[in-house]
Image (spheres, rainbow, N blue to C red):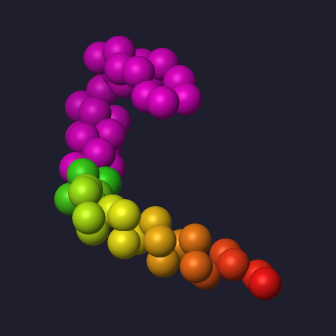
């Protein structure tokens, strides 16, 4: 299977590698936030970086 990531083109040649790739993206998808919740996470991160 050939897939593109944000940083590279990946060639996944065996079932174990494909399963790992799918597991990682499923985990990332499940932890993603959108909309107001994403804005809240970003605002918290920005506040934590404020070094005034």
Q: Is residue 23 visible?
A: no
Q: What residue is shown at x 25% (from left), y 57% (from top)?
A: 35
In the rendered image, the vertical position of residue 40 relative to residue 5, given as above or below: below
Q: Is residue 33 visible?
A: yes
Question: Nearest the camera: 33 or 31?
Answer: 33
The quarter of the picture where the N terminus appears is: top left
The quarter of the picture where the C terminus appears is: bottom right
Quadrant of the image occupied by residue 18? top left
Q: Is residue 8 magenta?
A: yes
Q: Residue furthest front?
A: 52
Q: Position of residue 26 (x, y in %)?
A: 22, 50
Q: Position of residue 12 (x, y in %)?
A: 37, 24
In the rendered image, the vertical position of residue 49 relative to residue 16, given as above or below: below
Q: How many marks?
A: 0
Q: Is residue 45 magenta?
A: no
Q: What residue is shown at x 27% (from left), y 68% (from top)?
A: 37
Horizontal placement of 19 versus 7: left or right?
A: left
Q: What residue is shown at x 29% (from left), y 45% (from top)?
A: 25
Quadrant of the image occupied by residue 31? bottom left
Magenta residues (range): 1-26
Q: What residue is shown at x 46% (from left), y 66% (from top)?
A: 42
Horizontal placement of 10 versus 37: left or right?
A: right
Q: Position of residue 49 (x, y in %)?
A: 67, 75
Quadrant of the image occupied by residue 28? bottom left
In the rendered image, the vertical position of residue 5 relative to residue 39, given as above or below: above
Question: Nearest the camera: 10 or 39?
Answer: 39
Q: Residue furthest right?
A: 52
Q: Position of residue 16 (x, y in %)?
A: 28, 38
């Amino acid at each position: 299977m050939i897939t593109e990531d944000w940083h590279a083109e990946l060639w996944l040649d065996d079932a174990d590698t494909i399963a790992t790739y799918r597991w990682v993206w499923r985990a990332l998808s499940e932890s993603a936030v959108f909309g107001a919740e994403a804005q809240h996470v970003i605002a918290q991160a920005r506040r934590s970086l404020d070094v005034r």
